[in-house]
């Protein structure tokens, strides 16, 4: 099921300084927003997320205790059954109540979340080909919703 690393995260105190540092290391800049930046480790395969903030002032900082493993789209569709066979329980992401895998069209990826025995957040994640004009969709879509949308888009 797991093909490699999709992403790892690090907390940083100064995002601008960290961006310059990781550029100097030769990592390819992928994207950024106000308090996060992502760099390619292997372009199109794995990246590093930098999160600005003081991790000691909040009970949970998104960059701590989380990694994502790269899987295929088809494997992600079967991930809940696979997790069940190895006696691992999926957990909802963020404010979601469903544990079902979901698509993020605006980011071009899909995920399902679970925890390790120590409560570390783990994720199975894959890249998803998204037409440019559908990247405006910021809602998280189920696989069923995504595939219906793509069927109607391609007609």
Image: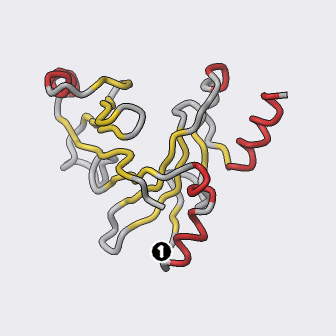
Viewer can see residue 97: yes
Query: Could you tell me residue 46's position as x and y percent?
Result: 36, 40
Judge left or right: residue 43 versus residue 137.
Answer: left
Quick one: label 1, few (<14), some, or many (20+) residues within 10 Å? some
Judge left or right: residue 44 versus residue 24.
Answer: right
Taking 36 as reference, is 9 above or below it? Answer: below
Q: Residue at x 58, y 61 (%)?
A: 99
Query: Could you tell me residue 22's position as x and y percent?
Result: 18, 28
Which of the 4 image quadrants contains residue 19? top left
Taking 139 as reference, is 30 above or below it? Answer: above
Viewer can see residue 36: no
Judge left or right: residue 149 versus residue 95.
Answer: right
Taking 34 as reference, is 52 above or below it? Answer: below
Q: Residue at x 23, y 43 (%)?
A: 10
Query: Could you tell me residue 83's position as x and y percent?
Result: 52, 71
Count of numbered tags: 1
Q: Residue at x 33, y 54 (%)?
A: 66
Quarter the C terminus occupies: top right
Judge left or right: residue 64 versus residue 2.
Answer: left
Relative depth, front residue between 112 and 85: 85
Query: Could you tell me residue 123's position as x and y percent?
Result: 44, 56
Q: Say what secondary structure mark 1 lies in.
A: loop
Q: Residue at x 45, y 64 (%)?
A: 114
Check disc 1 and report the residue beneath it.
88
The way the protein has been coloured in the rendering is secondary structure
């Amino acid at each position: 099921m797991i093909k490699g690393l999709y992403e790892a995260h690090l907390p940083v105190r100064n995002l601008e300084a960290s961006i310059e540092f990781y550029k100097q290391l030769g990592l390819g800049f992928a994207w950024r927003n106000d308090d996060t930046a992502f760099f390619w480790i292997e372009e199109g395969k794995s990246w590093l997320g930098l999160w600005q903030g003081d991790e000691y002032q909040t009970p949970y900082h998104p960059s701590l205790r989380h990694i994502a493993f790269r899987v295929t789209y088809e494997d992600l569709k079967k991930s809940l059954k696979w997790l069940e066979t190895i006696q691992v329980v999926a957990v909802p992401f963020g404010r979601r109540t469903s544990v079902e895998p979901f698509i993020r069209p605006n980011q071009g990826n899909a995920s399902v979340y679970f925890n390790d025995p120590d409560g570390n957040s783990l994720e199975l994640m894959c890249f998803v080909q998204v037409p440019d004009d559908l990247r405006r969709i910021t809602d998280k879509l189920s696989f069923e919703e995504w595939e219906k949308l793509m069927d109607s888009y391609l007609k």
